[in-house]
Amino acid sequence: MPNPKGNPENFKPIKSDRDKPLDGKLAFRVTKEIEEQVKAQDNPPEFCRDAIQKALDEKQGK
């Protein structure tokens, strides 16, 4: 019989080895082709974070 209050493992905070916590959230629309290419990456969220950071660095002249 499943636990009616859910799995206790789901309530534990996610551990991260990052310097700064990932507490912000972005959502934006893309073409179906871009969506498929991003989802084909090994780690889509990290791929997006890296791509955005790279674009911001280039814009700032780093």
Image (cartoon, rainbow, N blue to C red):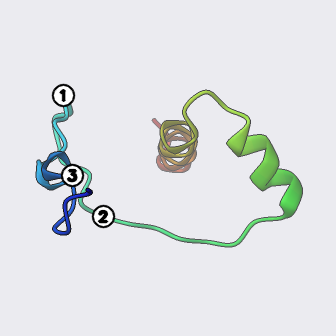
Q: Earlier in the sequence, mark 1 or mark 3?
A: 3
Q: How many marks?
A: 3
Q: Is residue 62 above or below residue 49?
A: above
Structural crowding at the residue carrying mark 2, measured as other residues with C-alpha within 10 Å and reported as few (<14), some (14–19) or many (≥20): few
Q: Is residue 48 above or below residue 35?
A: above
Q: Distance of mark 2 from mark 1, alpha carbons?
A: 17 Å
Q: Residue at x 11, y 48 (%)?
A: 12
Q: Residue at x 18, y 28 (%)?
A: 17
Give x and y (percent) for residue 36.
Answer: 80, 48
Identify residue type, mark 1: Asp
Give x and y (percent) for residue 51.
Answer: 58, 41
Give x and y (percent) for residue 60.
Answer: 47, 48
Image quadrant where one finds the C terminus? top left
Residue hosting label 3: 10
Give x and y (percent) for residue 38.
Answer: 70, 43
Residue hosting label 1: 17
